[in-house]
Image (spheres, rainbow, N blue to C red):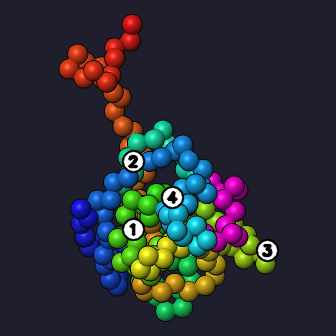
Amino acid sequence: MTGIYQVKGLDAMDSRIVTLNLPIVADNNLSLIDLARRAVGRTNLYNICPSIPFERLVQNRGVGGIMYPMLIPCLPKWGETAKKVAQRIAASGFILGDIAELAQLAAKYPDEIRKFAAVFALDHGSRWKNADGDICVSYVNIDGSRKRFSTYRLDRLFDEEDCVLVFRQVGHRFLALPPAVPCENNPCIKAPA
């Protein structure tokens, strides 16, 4: 279940609505391209943009565990580029999500993604230069049954219906799962001999 609350401090002029309580068990065993494939599903594999350099992007791999991402609508100021929106959100104390976290969110919560025109991963490790020298990032878009993993230039304008994947604090990125404790009541977990 998701919750919505007002976040003050992103902008002196307004407050933002943030979607939260989206726990995801982090899957650090899959490559970025495999995470993207899982996010769009078998019938949408052709909707993964071939210009995304999955093999070169950084994946923030923790020890595994549970992530608690949030979605912040961009609500850009007039003429504000994607880069400026990212800087403003980061300056407000949020940690920008990466491409792997975006793929895992899209796979687990497609209905949350559908609420927005596009959801962006703006973390520095998820940026690259295209053949024209433009800095690009990835976004996920779900329209009906069509799921897309595509690219966007940071020098372009964001739309009010766009959203950014963020974390409130570093600890929300990966909270380690407690180790399994062997006990006589659980036959699946054996005590070491």
**Residue 125 image offset from top left, x and y in percent:** 62, 58
Q: Is residue 52 left or right of residue 65?
A: right
| Residue 110 badge | 1
Q: Earlier in the sequence, mark 2 or mark 3?
A: 2
Residue range corresponding to the magenta coloring: 48-58
Which callout, 3 or 4, points to the residue nearer the camera? 4
Is 161 covered by the magenta stretch?
no
User: Residue placed at 69% from the left, 69% from the top?
Assistant: 50
Q: Earlier in the sequence, mark 3 or mark 1?
A: 1
**Residue 102 image offset from top left, x and y in percent:** 49, 62
Q: CA distance from mark 4 to mark 2?
A: 14 Å
Q: Earlier in the sequence, mark 3 or mark 4?
A: 4
Relative vertical location of residue 23 with respect to residue 82 in this rendering, above or below = above
User: Residue placed at 44% from the left, 61% from the top?
Assistant: 107
Q: CA distance from mark 3 to mark 1?
A: 31 Å
| Residue 38 badge | 4
The amino acid on which the numbered mark 4 sits, given as a three-letter code, is: Arg
Kindly identify which residue carries mark 2.
25
